[in-house]
Amino acid sequence: MSSHHHPAHFPDDFVWGVATSAFQIEGASDTDGKGPSVWDTFCKQPGAIADASDGTVACEHYLRYEQDLDMIAQLGIDAYRFSASWPRVQATGSGDWNTKGLDFYERLVDGLLARGVAPYLTLNHWDLPQALQDKGGWANRDTVHRFVDYALAMHARLGDRVASIATHNEPWVMSVLGHETGIFAPGIKSRATAMQVAHHLMLSHGMAMRALREAGCKASLGIVLNLSPIEPATDSAADRAKARLEDGRLVRWYMDPLFKGTYPADVLEHLENDVPAVQPGDMDIIRTPMDFLGINYYSRSVASAGEPWDVHKSGLETTEMDWEVYPQGLTALLLRLHQDYPVPAMFITENGGAFKDPMVDGKVHDADRTRYLQQHIQAVADAMQQGVNMGGYMVWSLMDNFEWASGYAKRFGIVHVNYATQKRTLKDSALWYQQFLAEQATARLAQVA
Ligand code: IFM
């Protein structure tokens, strides 16, 4: 990786953005007819959230979206990636549509367009209607059909104005953290359930893609995966085998069906009786060609057959999440995906870090976050130089927000949020990004002239 910190030569149409998700910022968890989601329920479980917080207020974005839109415009980004809350537009996940919920997303989309920012919509960023969970949630095949209905309803309202639609955000997280380790909603601990959930998420992705295309949707369609390179802790055969299996579960379990129409044989064999039920035709549906692949990248993962890997012994810088800062892993990951799969344009749909960044005299000097962003943008540039087709890059996150089981203690924003006053303050990283984007825009104009 080259060391200079001002990566240049991104193509003119490269899309720069920031990302958020509904549950993490909106608040207003039962306002205007919104129904409860699995995360509303999960937050009530004692001990589930580190600071015992929940999403009832969050960043009050539901009320303050106009001000947030102005802030987005001020950054100078091309695109804003956000998610819609399914229970806000359909309280129980079936039956009536909630007009007020749909109206909110329409105001948001129109507000972005009025400011020259492209709306990038994610349909499912984890907040499944609780009423569907009560019927088995993603483990129930019927949820797949409910999701397609939801996708079509969003298309009917917004499909002519959003630039991009991602079906799901991070199916591995919903499957494994939600249903195998149970540290995320809905808090189930069963590997068999987790794998059935993963299959239904992938199936619903493919079905929604087809339904949206049949409905004439012009938006660019795809999915967002959380991917990491998995490196063995040592060169031992046992560690390498462990790394191969974890790669199978995190990367190939999603990439193989999307691009080859099969689940990886080694993982199926490993799962034994926990393999999901797959019906004839499912794999063809999952393989439906996509317009883009979204990748959320934060760190590498280290696999060890013995003692669990201790990030603090690696000597690498770590973030507040105890994730290693490992930008070279992003270049390696992108090259590998490019080599192993017939991928469409790839987008980094999330990248960023939680850092301790105290506010001093109204300013947040988060040099560590700025450096993190610079290094990862350079890592994307390095992959592009080696022939990888990249469509864009989005910072996670626009502003500090509800970091799931970590609550509000972990701050990923390039904008600081004071949760007592809801005041937003651009951190130094936001000011840097703003400046960097201004330079990119100038370079574009210079090429036109
Ligand atoms: O905050 C999350 C986001 O919702 C999904 N991807 C990872 C982020 C940081 O943990």
Image (cartoon, grey):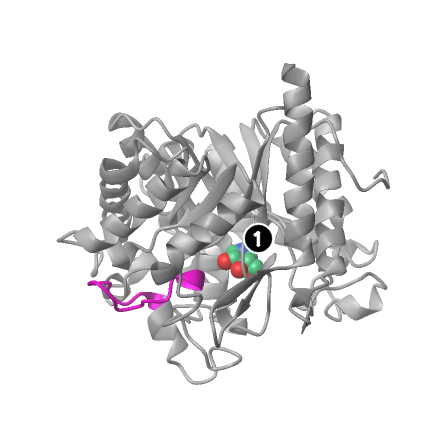
Name the outermost residue toward the top: 449
Question: In front: 193, or 26?
Answer: 26
Residue 104 in view here: yes
Q: Nearer the viewer, residue 224 or 435?
A: 435
Residue 351, percent across and down? 62, 50
Instruction: Say which residue appears at 69% left-offset and 26% top-offset.
Output: 443
Residue 321 position, x and y percent, is 65, 67
Furthest residue in direction front, as rendered: 361
**Hey, which quadrant is residue 40 in on the image?**
bottom left
Q: Secondary structure at mark 1?
A: strand
Residue that mark 1 sits on: 396
The vertical placement of 419 against 354, above or below, is: below
Query: From the viewer's perspective, is 448 left or right of 62?
Result: right
Q: Is mark 1 within 8 Å of ligand 1?
A: yes
Residue 43, by quadrant, is: bottom left
Q: Residue placed at 29% from the left, 44% from the top?
A: 106
The dominant secondary structure in magenta is loop
Mark 1 surroundings within 10 Å by alpha-carbon count, few (fewer than 14), some (14 through 19), many (20 or more): many
Tally of numbered discs: 1
Residue that sits furthest to the bottom in the current view:
46
Query: Magenta segment, which residues?
Result: 23-38
